[in-house]
């Protein structure tokens, strides 16, 4: 296939497996932003919609489901939390979409079917053409066995949609579950690519600093996130939240105190003890508020004892607890939706997901837990788009429980800040890379350098035959790093085979542009395999595979140098199992040495008409003896252009820049002053920076705009430094 055909095929393999539909073919009742999202989700085939409560996830998933059914002729199943099935059924009526509510596979009818998560064992999920997870964040509430059952049973379903409110920004496990469900990559692969297991912080996963923006753009390749339609540049005037009135009731601590003032409880055990001590007072205060009103109330509690006492103290109340029969729970949750139940007493873990209770505008938290997500989801059952009245939210706490409220407030502030950051990143992908996807090119030329913005496979076509004296670069390390979300990015590959197929398009042109008898050097390393991805822990011969690609293109393999790297630093950075001392003590057969870097040099056949010559003065014998060593042990790993030029701008940091000393040695050894040096993966311009300083010309190609811009700035700095060297 030609290059354009390869890119088109790669784009499909990277996740767009659906079909295209025009917006005028979608239900006219949908808002414009809902139509755009449905169109995108159908094109993707497998995607997630993370939309704030009240933005219409139900009509969007129904429209998606009916279009998948019509396209494939197969049935679609919606999995939903308890009592949400009937809400979806009723919503379908409004949109003219028939939905069959099922308790088992015997109830399935042609078209769209819906059931509760609790009944999934009664269905053969793999029989469906499409599946929707409504309130998909509920996956993490299930045991690992059930969550894995859903993911594994749906593995081969061609069309998938996951819908939930915007996830907690730091809940990477939840995003990993979605990523795995949608067949994007496994949760472990996602963690390996973008995260570090922070052993200094309770072994939690944190985003690699250089990967933050790339990670959220990666999420944006399979998910859309929004708090308001305006987040996606649509009119959000119809989606304004009502006022939320937070009413705090702080009860006096009546327990025996050793100090003059009541001391706030700290830690889970102390808080639980404080809740137990204040239970009767909290429940009585809750009952007083509700019994003095005739309006509908939603009461949230955390423990069965609280739930039982509240239902005894409050008039017209119905208690729904976890041990109740599913049909009983569903009947009363729906009864509350239809205003047949005046007061509902339950827990966030039971009714905190998916239910739309805009009809109620009064709720009470009879105590709080440290879970901000449970608190937030519980509030959003009533405080959501579509609510017409001020939502009164009562918080009933004892003096000892103030620390819990302060923790919730702190988490709320952090959540908003991080959530805004996520949406700002993800919407960039949706609005620019999905709706208006553009491939950008540019070129900047002067006497010392030429920098091209664009795809190296295409831009190298502009370089004349036999015009490059030397090439030196660090190619993407197969699929180890993802530099951008573009299908043109070689690092954005599904696997090694796809990367190598992509790289071969470039290798032939690298031979074409190189002068006869001149050289090309590339930086690489052996790549560790991951058990969850390759099925074993070992090494991949990336170095050898790249050598063979260049040999197939016509180059001759002529030289190789090993660059020593400190295994202790590598162990601290990667936590690789084979480098851990505890693994040596446990079973040394799984231990290995650290991985060095390599600089491999290839030669184009033919006579070199411009020999590279050196004098004793310019290249003393003792320097040559050091350069001639097959192992360079004196390379400063931290001396990179990244350290010099992009320390404060994380988006402009190149993930694995080549050390400047390595570039200098290669240029000294294999080029003459005035030679033209090429890097088809210029990054932030490391190779050009050193080339210009040494009086060589430079041609660079870079795909990523932020790297390209930084490279140009760095090349200008190099020009200034070179002039200063000339003067002095």
Image: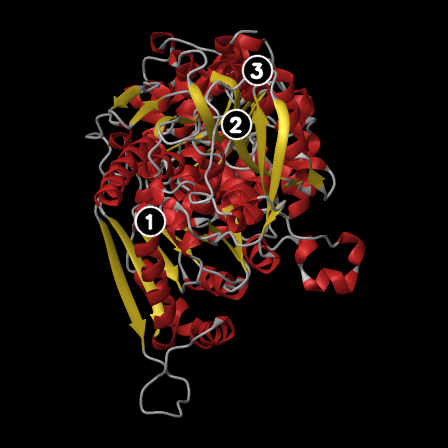
Image location (x, y in percent) of residue 159:
56, 20
Camera-side residue: 342 or 669? Answer: 669
Is residue 98 visible in this depiction of the protein?
A: no
657 w.r.t. 452: above or below: below
Is 282 on the left or on the right of 718, as rendered? right
User: Which of the two discs, 2 and 1, labels the residue nearer the N terminus?
Assistant: 2
Is the residue marked by circle 3 packed among few (<14), some (14-19), or many (20+) residues within 10 Å? few
- Helix, strand or loop at label 1? It is helix
- Helix, strand or loop at label 3? It is loop
Image location (x, y in percent) of residue 301:
45, 59
Q: CA distance from mark 2 to mark 3?
A: 14 Å
Camera-side residue: 453 or 162? Answer: 453
The quarter of the picture where the N terminus appears is top right
Figure disc tally:
3
Image location (x, y in percent) of residue 12:
52, 17
Is the residue marked by circle 1 packed among few (<14), some (14-19), or many (20+) residues within 10 Å? few
Q: Residue at x 45, y 76 (%)?
A: 274
Is residue 132 visible in this depiction of the protein?
A: yes
Q: Which residue is mark 2?
A: 520
**Marks 2 and 3: which is nearer the front?**
3
Is 617 on the left or on the right of 350, as rendered? left
Q: Which residue is mark 1?
A: 644
User: Which of the two discs, 1 and 3, labels the residue nearer the N terminus?
Assistant: 3
Image location (x, y in percent) of residue 502:
55, 20
Is 612 on the left or on the right of 296, as rendered? right
Q: Which residue is mark 3?
A: 606
Q: CA distance from mark 1 to mark 3?
A: 39 Å
567 w.r.t. 429: above or below: below
Residue lying at the far front in this picture: please name it. 616
**Marks 2 and 1: which is nearer the front?**
2
**Marks 1 and 3: which is nearer the front?**
3
Residue 712 picture quarter: top left
């Amino acid at each position: 296939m030609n290059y354009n055909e390869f890119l088109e095929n790669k784009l499909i393999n990277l996740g767009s497996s659906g079909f295209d539909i025009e917006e005028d073919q979608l239900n006219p009742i949908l808002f414009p932003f809902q139509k755009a999202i449905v169109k995108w989700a159908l094109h993707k085939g497998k995607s997630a919609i993370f939309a704030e409560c009240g933005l219409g996830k139900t009509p969007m998933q129904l429209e998606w489901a009916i279009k998948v059914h019509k396209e494939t002729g197969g049935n679609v199943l919606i999995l939903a939390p308890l009592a949400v099935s009937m809400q979806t059924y009723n919503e379908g009526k409004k949109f003219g979409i028939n939905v069959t509510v099922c308790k088992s596979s015997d109830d399935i009818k042609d078209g769209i079917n819906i059931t509760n998560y609790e009944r999934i064992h009664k269905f053969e999920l793999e029989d469906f053409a499409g599946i929707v997870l409504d309130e998909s964040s509920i996956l993490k509430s299930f045991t690992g066995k059930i969550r894995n059952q859903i993911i594994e049973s749906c593995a081969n379903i061609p069309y998938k949609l996951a819908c939930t409110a915007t996830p907690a920004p730091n809940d990477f496990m939840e995003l990993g579950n979605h990523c795995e469900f949608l067949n994007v990559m496994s949760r472990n692969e996602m963690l390996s690519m973008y995260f570090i297991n922070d052993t200094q912080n309770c072994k939690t996963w944190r985003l690699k600093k250089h990967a933050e923006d790339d990670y959220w753009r990666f999420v944006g390749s399979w998910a859309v996130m929004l708090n308001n339609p305006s987040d996606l540049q649509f009119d959000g005037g119809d989606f304004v939240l009502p006022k939320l009135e937070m009413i705090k009731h702080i009860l006096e601590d009546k327990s025996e105190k050793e100090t003059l003032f009541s001391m706030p409880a700290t830690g889970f055990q102390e808080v639980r003890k404080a809740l137990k001590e204040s239970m009767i007072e909290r429940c009585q205060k809750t009952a007083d508020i509700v019994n003095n009103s005739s309006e509908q109330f939603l009461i949230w509690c955390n423990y069965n004892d609280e739930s039982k006492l509240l239902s005894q103290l409050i008039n017209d109340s119905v208690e729904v607890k976890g041990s109740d029969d599913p049909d009983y729970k569903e009947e009363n949750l729906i009864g509350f939706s239809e205003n047949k139940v005046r007061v509902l007493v339950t827990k966030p873990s039971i009714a905190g997901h998916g239910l739309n209770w805009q009809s109620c505008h009064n709720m009470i938290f009879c105590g709080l837990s440290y879970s901000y997500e449970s608190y937030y989801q519980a509030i959003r059952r009533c405080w959501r788009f579509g609510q017409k009245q001020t939502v009164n939210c009562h918080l009933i706490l004892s003096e000892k429980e103030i620390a819990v409220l302060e923790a919730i407030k702190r988490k709320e502030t952090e959540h908003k800040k991080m959530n805004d950051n996520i949406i700002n990143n993800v919407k960039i992908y949706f609005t620019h890379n999905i709706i208006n996807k553009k491939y950008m090119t540019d070129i900047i030329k002067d006497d010392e350098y030429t920098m091209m913005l664009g795809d190296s496979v295409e831009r190298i076509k502009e370089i004349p035959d036999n015009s490059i004296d030397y090439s030196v670069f660090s190619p993407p390390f197969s699929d180890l790093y993802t530099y951008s979300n573009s299908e043109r990015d070689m690092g954005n590959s599904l696997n090694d085979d796809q990367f190598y197929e992509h790289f071969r398009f470039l290798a032939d042109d690298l031979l074409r542009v190189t002068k006869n008898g001149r050289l090309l050097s590339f930086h690489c390393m052996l790549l560790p395999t991951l058990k969850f991805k390759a099925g074993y822990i070992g090494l991949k011969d990336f170095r050898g595979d790249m050598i063979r690609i260049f040999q197939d293109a016509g180059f001759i393999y002529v030289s190789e140098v090993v660059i020593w790297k400190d295994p202790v630093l590598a162990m601290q950075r990667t936590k690789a199992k084979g480098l851990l001392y505890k693994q040596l003590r446990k079973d040394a057969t799984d231990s290995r040495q650290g991985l060095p870097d390599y600089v491999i040099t290839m030669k184009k056949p033919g006579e070199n008409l411009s020999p590279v010559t050196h004098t004793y003065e310019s290249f003393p014998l003792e320097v040559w003896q050091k350069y001639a060593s097959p192992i360079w042990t004196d390379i400063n790993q931290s001396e990179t252009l990244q350290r010099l030029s992009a320390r404060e701008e994380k988006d402009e940091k190149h993930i694995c820049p080549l050390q400047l000393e390595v570039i200098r040695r290669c240029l000294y050894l294999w080029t003459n002053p005035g030679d033209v040096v090429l890097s088809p993966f210029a990054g932030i311009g490391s190779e050009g920076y050193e080339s210009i300083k040494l009086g060589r010309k430079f041609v660079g190609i870079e795909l990523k705009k932020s790297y390209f811009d930084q490279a140009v700035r760095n090349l200008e700095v190099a020009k200034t430094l070179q002039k200063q060297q000339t003067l002095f």
